[in-house]
Image: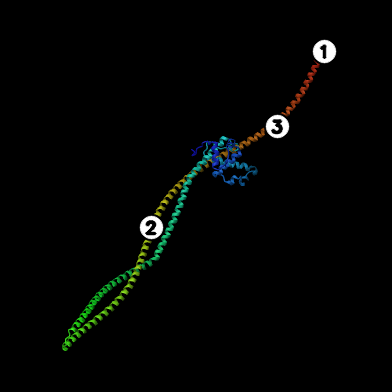
């Protein structure tokens, strides 16, 4: 059974389909009264549209090797081209399993009904093929889009891999610097801890010296207060001085001893004060040094902060690398999905190719059958041609015999005509003589 239907398309639809497919521009009147040249041109255009005839074949060129087998090749160019077209149209109609067989008469002396049926079969096939091609085109377009998307994803993956490799190389290049920074950070941390300990010890020493300085200031203030009291006592004693020289001398000696003690105490206080001042200068110098160390510690702290910032940057880069790894994994998953879809489409394409191969095998089998049938018909036609040639020769011989018989019959007819004329003349003579005799007899009888 054929896979196509053969509804006899109206001539208006045939004209519309031919125009839509850009095969030919015709009118319904051309189909009502088809001419051999019109049908030949129309069938040629249809076969060119479906790819059964190339354009160079349509230009009327016939291989010289095929024409060399004929006696007068120039006289058979048109007939050979028509026979080639006839064989291809007949093969095409036979492969379409049309219920009516295409004959040479349908090409040389076409009829409107047969032409309408054959054109309906051809155009139905063309419409069916275009519908199937549209389905395949959608699959092909989807495959093309998937291939482009796959190439894009592969490019993105390659770019991501290149970025990852670049990040890894930069990380490997920066690893010695990072390790050096880590070592410096550790050394700075140890230095900072030592300086902190030294600062604490200096602060405790400064506090201790401040306490001692306060004690010395209290002692100095007490000595000054005692000196003031001594002066007051000296004044009061002077006011109470008696006239006795011995007592005065003893009081003076006591006062001198007390004054010497006070001066000694004052000297000791001043010495202690100077010592405290020198200690204070030492402490100020130590404080300046501590300030310098503090500034150094602040600079080290800034370096530590920068190192921490570097660590944060390294962590950010590691996080970015991990995110890129996750993105790569997601892209790999998407690529795997697209690859699976591409495999499915590839399997579908393989199935379509298998169906096409099966159809091609069936078509080739049908083509072989048609070729064998054509070969059988050709042999039968050759036998018929031989029989026809024998019959034609026999007919020619019969015609020659008929012509000879006609010539002989014409000669006999001429001879019979001559005889008939002679007999007519003799008859007229006899009738004249008979008339004369009768007139004589009548005349004698009257006498």
Which element carries disc 3, helix, strand or loop? helix
Expressed as whole percent of the image width and height from the top left, the position of residue 17 reads 54, 40
Residue appearing at x 41%, y 62% in the figure: 167
Q: Which mark is residue 254?
A: none
In the image, residue 447 above or below residue 117 = above
Q: Which circle, 3 or 1, is nearer the viewer?
A: 1
Q: Are marks 3 and 2 in contact (CB under 8 Å)?
A: no
- Dividing the picture into quadrants, the one containing residue 214 is bottom left
Which element carries disc 1, helix, strand or loop? helix
The residue where tag 2 is placed is 323
The residue where tag 1 is placed is 443
- Dividing the picture into quadrants, the one containing residue 384 is top right
Expressed as whole percent of the image width and height from the top left, the position of residue 440 reads 82, 14
Find the distance from the CA under tag 3 to the CA under tag 2: 113 Å
Find the distance from the CA under tag 2 to the CA under tag 1: 161 Å
Number of residues whose C-alpha sits closer than 10 Å to that of mark 3, classed few (under 14), some (14–19) or many (20 or more): few
For this rendering, which residue is in front, 349 or 186? 186
Residue appearing at x 30%, y 75% in the figure: 284
Q: Earlier in the sequence, mark 3 or mark 2?
A: 2
Q: Which circle, 2 or 1, is nearer the viewer?
A: 2
Q: In screen coordinates, is 400 left or right of 327?
A: right
For this rendering, which residue is in front, 202 or 171? 202
The residue where tag 3 is placed is 404
Q: How is the image coloured?
A: rainbow
């Amino acid at each position: 059974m054929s896979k196509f239907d053969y509804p006899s398309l109206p001539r208006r639809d045939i004209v519309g389909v031919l125009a839509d497919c850009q095969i030919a521009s015709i009118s319904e009147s051309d189909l009502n009264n088809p001419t051999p040249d019109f049908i030949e041109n129309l069938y040629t255009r249809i076969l060119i549209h479906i790819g059964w005839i190339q354009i160079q074949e349509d230009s009327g060129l016939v291989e010289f090797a095929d024409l060399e087998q004929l006696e007068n090749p120039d006289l058979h160019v048109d007939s050979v081209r028509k026979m080639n077209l006839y064989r291809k149209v007949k093969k095409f109609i036979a492969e379409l399993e049309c219920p009516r067989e295409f004959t040479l008469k349908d090409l040389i002396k076409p009829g409107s009904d047969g032409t309408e049926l054959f054109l309906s079969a051809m155009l139905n096939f063309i419409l069916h093929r275009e519908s199937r091609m549209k389905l395949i085109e959608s699959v092909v377009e989807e495959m093309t889009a998937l291939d482009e998307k796959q190439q894009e994803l592969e490019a993105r993956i390659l770019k991501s891999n290149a970025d990852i490799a670049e990040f890894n190389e930069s990380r490997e290049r920066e690893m010695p610097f990072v390790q050096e920074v880590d070592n410096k950070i550790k050394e700075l941390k140890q230095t900072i801890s030592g300086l902190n300990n030294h600062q604490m010890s200096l602060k405790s020493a400064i506090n201790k010296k401040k306490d001692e300085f306060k004690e010395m200031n209290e002692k100095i203030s007490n000595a000054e207060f005692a000196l003031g009291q001594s002066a007051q006592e000296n004044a009061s004693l002077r006011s109470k001085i008696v006239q006795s020289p011995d007592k005065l001398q003893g009081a003076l000696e006591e006062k001198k001893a007390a004054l010497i003690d006070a001066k000694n105490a004052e000297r000791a206080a001043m010495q202690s004060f100077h010592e405290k001042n020198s200690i204070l200068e030492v402490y100020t110098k130590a404080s300046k040094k501590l300030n310098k160390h503090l500034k150094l510690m602040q600079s080290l702290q800034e370096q530590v902060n920068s190192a921490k910032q570097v660590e944060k940057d390294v962590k950010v880069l590691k996080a970015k690398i991990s995110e890129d790894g996750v993105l790569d994994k997601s892209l790999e998953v998407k690529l795997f999905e697209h690859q699976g879809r591409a495999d499915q489409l590839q399997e579908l394409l393989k199935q379509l190719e298998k169906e096409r191969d099966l159809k091609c095998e069936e078509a080739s089998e049908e083509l072989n059958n048609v070729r064998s049938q054509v070969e059988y018909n050709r042999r039968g036609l050759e036998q018929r041609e031989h029989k026809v040639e024998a019959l034609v020769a026999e007919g020619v011989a019969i015609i020659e015999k008929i012509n000879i018989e006609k010539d002989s019959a014409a000669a006999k007819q001429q001879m019979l005509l001559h005889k008939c004329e002679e007999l007519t003349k003799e008859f007229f003579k006899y009738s004249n003589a008979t008339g004369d005799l009768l007139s004589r007899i009548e005349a004698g009888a009257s006498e």
